Amino acid sequence: MSESDKKAVLEAKLAYYKQHEHNRCVLFIRQDQIGAHQHDRQSNGSWRQRRLEDPTAALAFPDIGSIGRLVDLYKVTPLYPFTPH
C-alpha cells in the first residue's frame, strides 16, 4: 500500500480477504516507507488490527508464530538497509 491508495479500495480488499473463512491474517505492506497494517482473526471470529511502524517489530501470525522483523520485508528495496537505534 502507498499514500496514493484510495481508502475505499483498501477497505474493499480487506473485506474480500476477511470473508474467506480459512483466512486468519491479512497484511498490507507499505511500499513508500517501512510499515504495515496487520489484521488477525480472533478465536471468536472478530478481527484485531495492529499497525506496525517500528522496523524491529516482530512479524508474528496466528498459527505460525514469529517469522522475522518488519524490516526484513524490505531487504531488496531502496528502503533497506536499516540501522536499528
Image (tube, rainbow, N blue to C red):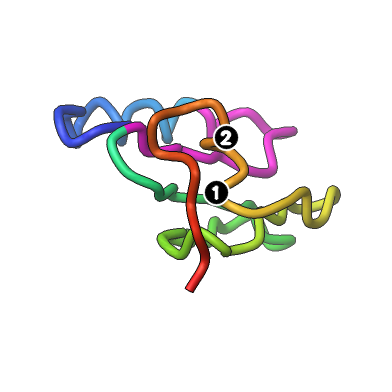
As shown in the figure, which amino acid type bears the numbered disc 2? Lys
Residue 24: horizontal and vertical position, in percent?
69, 43
In which image quadrant can residue 69 be found? bottom right
Q: Are discs 2 and 1 less than 8 Å apart at CB?
A: yes
Camera-side residue of 32 and 22: 32
Q: Quadrant where the N terminus lies?
A: top left
Label 1, secondary structure: give it: helix
Measured Cα–Cα span from mark 2 to mark 1: 7 Å
User: Residue 32 placed where, x, y %?
Assistant: 28, 35
Q: Which mark is residue 75?
A: 2
Residue on which the image places disc 1? 71
Residue beneath the point at 42% across and 34% down: 14
* Amino acid type of the residue that numbered disc 1 sits on in the rendered structure: Val
- Residues in magenta? 17-31
**Residue drawn 56% across and 39% down?**
26
Q: Nearer the viewer, residue 69 or 4?
A: 69
Near mark 1 (Cα within 10 A), the count class, few <14, some 14-19 or many ≥20, is many
